[in-house]
Image (cartoon, helix red, strand yellow):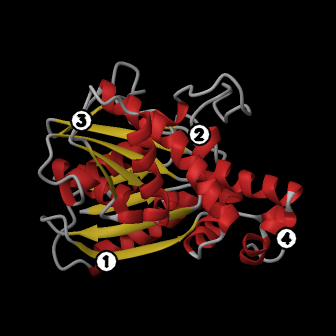
């Protein structure tokens, strides 16, 4: 089967066998100005190439899409690039590639990927949270993705955690995403640069020498090197995240909460302060055994989830 992961920053196409083993993978940067037409051309080319290279017939395709998905109607939309509004992507794959196709948003796909092939193997219930430019989430309970009545289950990034703060991309104020997403972490680095540029010299160096170009990756890398200011930014983000995780634990009480996405690549620089904050915020009389772990499949969780959907079809 073929798995496809369409993201606002990168895209990936993989060929998988019937056991979910990745045989081939191709990836590249997403050219956002190219919109839908550019991305469809990439998918067409990579998929046809994998079909030709496969030693066995390719039976199905699964797609992880970095944006809202109407799962019931198999339609996608996107706030990142033009041309996707109510686009029948699964039907396009069937017509263009001759393969049955199923798609879901990247957070649900990431949850399914980790459940089948990653850190969630052997669990009954997990919550996957992707910490990237924004924050998304997916729930798998009893072996199935739980979407809720309006396909809004798992929208952890839009939990209101404060009455103040900047306006979120969703239009609301005080969402978790505005405090600990990659975008929020980068903005905190730039805020530090405006107030105390002498304290963020390493972050500026890692961003090409321009304070206005500080990225979340630069903050994370500086924190991993022991930079004091970057460490403070990561601990602050971790505390906000811990508040949301405790809410998830109180409501869902999953076996595991799995942290994926680019920000999660910070590893223990993020995970350790998250666990410390959970201990501080938690109640001594309401214990829990939910594990907080990093995604085993790292950046490939959604791609593996796409493959899992394709395998279910095949």
Q: As rendered, which of 275 and 257 lies closer to the eye?
A: 275
- Circle 2 residue: 177
Q: At x 53% / y 43%, what residue is drawn?
A: 239
Badge 2: how crowded within 10 Å, few (<14), some, or many (20+)?
A: many
Q: At x 59% / y 39%, what residue is drawn?
A: 177
Disc on res. 24: 1
Q: CA distance from mark 2 to mark 4?
A: 25 Å
Earlier in the chain: of badge 4 and badge 3, it is 4
Earlier in the chain: of badge 1 and badge 4, it is 1
Mark 4 or 3: the one toward you: 3
Disc on res. 210: 4
- Circle 3 residue: 288
Residues under numbered marks 1 and 2 in contact, where contact means CB atoms less than 8 Å apart: no
Earlier in the chain: of badge 1 and badge 2, it is 1
Earlier in the chain: of badge 2 and badge 4, it is 2
Q: Is residue 243 visible?
A: yes
Q: As rendered, which of 169 and 257 lies closer to the eye?
A: 257
């Amino acid at each position: 089967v073929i798995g496809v992961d369409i993201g606002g920053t990168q895209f990936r196409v993989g060929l998988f066998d019937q056991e979910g083993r990745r045989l081939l993978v191709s990836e590249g940067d997403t050219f956002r100005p190219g919109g839908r037409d550019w991305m469809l051309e990439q998918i067409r080319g990579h998929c046809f190439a994998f079909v030709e290279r496969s030693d066995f017939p390719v039976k199905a395709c699964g797609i992880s899409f970095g944006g809202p998905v109407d799962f019931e109607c198999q339609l996608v939309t996107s706030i990142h690039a033009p041309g996707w509004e109510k686009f029948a992507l699964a039907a396009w794959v069937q017509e263009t590639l001759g393969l049955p196709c199923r798609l879901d948003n990247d957070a649900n796909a990431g949850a399914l990927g980790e459940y089948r092939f990653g850190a969630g193997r052997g669990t009954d219930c997990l919550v996957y949270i992707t910490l990237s430019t924004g924050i998304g989430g997916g729930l798998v309970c009893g072996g199935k993705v739980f979407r809720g009545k309006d396909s809004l289950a798992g929208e952890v990034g839009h939990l209101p955690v404060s009455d103040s703060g900047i306006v979120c991309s969703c239009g609301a104020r005080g969402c978790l995403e505005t405090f600990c997403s990659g975008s929020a972490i980068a903005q905190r680095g730039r805020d530090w640069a405006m107030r105390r540029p002498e304290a963020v010299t390493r972050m500026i160096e890692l961003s090409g020498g321009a304070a206005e170009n500080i990225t979340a990756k630069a903050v994370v890398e500086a924190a991993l090197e022991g930079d004091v200011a970057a460490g403070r930014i990561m601990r602050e983000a971790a505390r906000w995240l811990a508040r949301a995780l405790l809410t998830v634990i109180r409501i869902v009480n999953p076996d595991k909460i799995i942290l994926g996405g680019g920000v999660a690549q910070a590893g223990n620089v993020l995970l350790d302060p998250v666990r410390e904050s959970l201990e501080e915020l938690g109640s001594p009389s309401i214990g829990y055994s939910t594990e907080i772990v990093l995604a085993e499949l790292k950046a490939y969780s959604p791609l593996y989830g796409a493959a899992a959907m394709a395998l279910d079809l095949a």
